[in-house]
Image (spheres, helix red, strand yellow):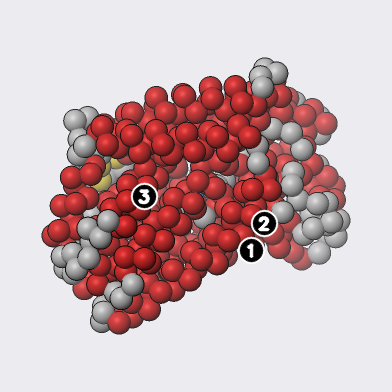
Amino acid sequence: MFTLAATGSAVGLGNIWKFPYIAGEHGGGAFVLVYLACLALIGVPIMMAEILIGRRGRQSPINTLQMLGREEDAGSHWGMVGFIGVAAGVIIISFYSVIAGWALAYVARMASGMFSGVTAAGSQSIFSALISDPERLLAWHTIFMVMTTLVVARGVRSGLEQAVKVMMPVLFFLLLLLTAYALNIGEFERSFRFLFQPDFSALSRGGVLIAMGHAFFTLSLGVGAIMVYGSYLPSRVSIAKAALVVALMDTLVALLAGVTIFAIVFANGLPVAAGPGLIFQTLPIAFGQMPGGLFFGTLFFVLLVLAAWTSAISLVEPAVAWLVENRALLRVRAAVVVGVIAWLLGIATVMSFSDWSFRFRFAGEYRNTGVFDLLDILTSGIMLPLGGFSIALFAGWAMSRRSVRDELGGRDGLAFRLWYLAIRYVAPLAVSLVFLHTVGIFGVLG
Ligand code: PFF
């Protein structure tokens, strides 16, 4: 079923690991508000466009866009958009796998009892020891990349859907358990205010771009992942409903994770802007204190790995599907080729947290973790919004109104007209404005 596969793709490290740390780095409330607005105004309409394109084309994203472009007399160069997505997917999996490796390492650490009764300082030093050990990181990264390549090589769709069916309820249960813990430690209200009371003075130019980019990242847009899964959706099923369900579940997981983590941050006097290590430094403290924490903590990191795994599969699938269709490669070979490229590129991220770390400035703020940050900004900040923008243009302008309406159920009601407005004008304009804002054009103008 589409909804299961797409939820598996959308819910991942982006929700539990990335959202809290970037919200913390960019001042909380205002960032969250921009993020939520981008989800509703840009993310959901573009997700619907990706699904409808995928369902109509039923091939790998590159070929689907080429074929539909020709069919609509708009030219086959639209396949280029698919290429941006394929490239973005391969770059993202290279660092995604390294972070999933941290989660794998934490399964072992949690299970060993290392965190029982741990202090904030203890938790921080356990995390630093891990990320400054490139050999260890490389080993975990390798294991995760092999796990991903194996699934993609076998092309097990039913396995994926079964896994998501079990994973989501357990993940929700554990998040609610953590939220209950957070409610008990006295800083829940402060955490809530931090995330939901907007303070626009705390939001930098770069922060706006990162918030928009994260709306694409968290919904798996701009890569072609959702397009691939769109072909799983039977033609009678409502695309709008499917997109809304996926977006709502995705947002709920992110907000639950965020509110819990900042309660732990405030209760322990930790910095909100701790960066990519945030959840790895905070959650073990919670598990270390709660009854049954060893079990629940281990289970939590197992689920985080699972969630990352079901997302990782969808990151490589567009590239693999294209190799299979165009180069007539066996699926196994195609998966290995993509896996090896991503694994090699991942070494740069492994090294980013120790020997190769460097500092640079981006849109008015400093970044500390070298290549990892560069790849993250390149993909979430540039490639995904650009891919999504092009998809909006494709569905809104290159395809005929008739084709898209047929795919969305055929009726010309209010819902269709709102979507059409969003895809033709709102989403492309919003992405352009955020890009212009990031390079500082509005500041220059006065
Ligand atoms: N949506 C995933 C997450 O939030 O972890 C990451 C992701 C998966 C991004 C697939 C893009 C993609 F195509």
Q: Residue at x 21, y 37 (%)?
A: 133
Residue 19 in sight in this render: no
User: Which residue lies most toward the left here?
Assistant: 121
Label 2 to label 1: alpha-carbon separation = 8 Å
Neighbor class of circle 2 (other Cα within 10 Å; few <14, some 14-19, many 20+) is many
Towards the viewer: 166 or 369? 166
**Element at label 3:** helix
- What residue sits right under mark 2 in the picture? 3
User: Which residue lies most toward the front here?
Assistant: 112
Neighbor class of circle 1 (other Cα within 10 Å; few <14, some 14-19, many 20+) is few
Instruction: State if disc 1 and disc 2 touch (CB < 8 Å).
Output: yes
In x, y percent, where is residue 288? 25, 67
Residue 332 in sight in this render: yes
**Mark 1 belongs to which amino acid?**
Val
Label 3 to label 1: alpha-carbon separation = 27 Å
- What residue sits right under mark 3 in the picture? 103
In x, y percent, where is residue 98? 36, 39
Left/right of residue 290 with respect to residue 320 in the rendered view: left
In x, y percent, where is residue 167? 54, 59
Towards the viewer: 43 or 183? 183
Left/right of residue 269 with respect to residue 221 in the rendered view: left
Q: How many marks?
A: 3
**Element at label 1:** helix
Towards the viewer: 317 or 85? 317
Q: Nearer the viewer, mark 2 or mark 1?
A: 2
**Mark 2 belongs to which amino acid?**
Thr
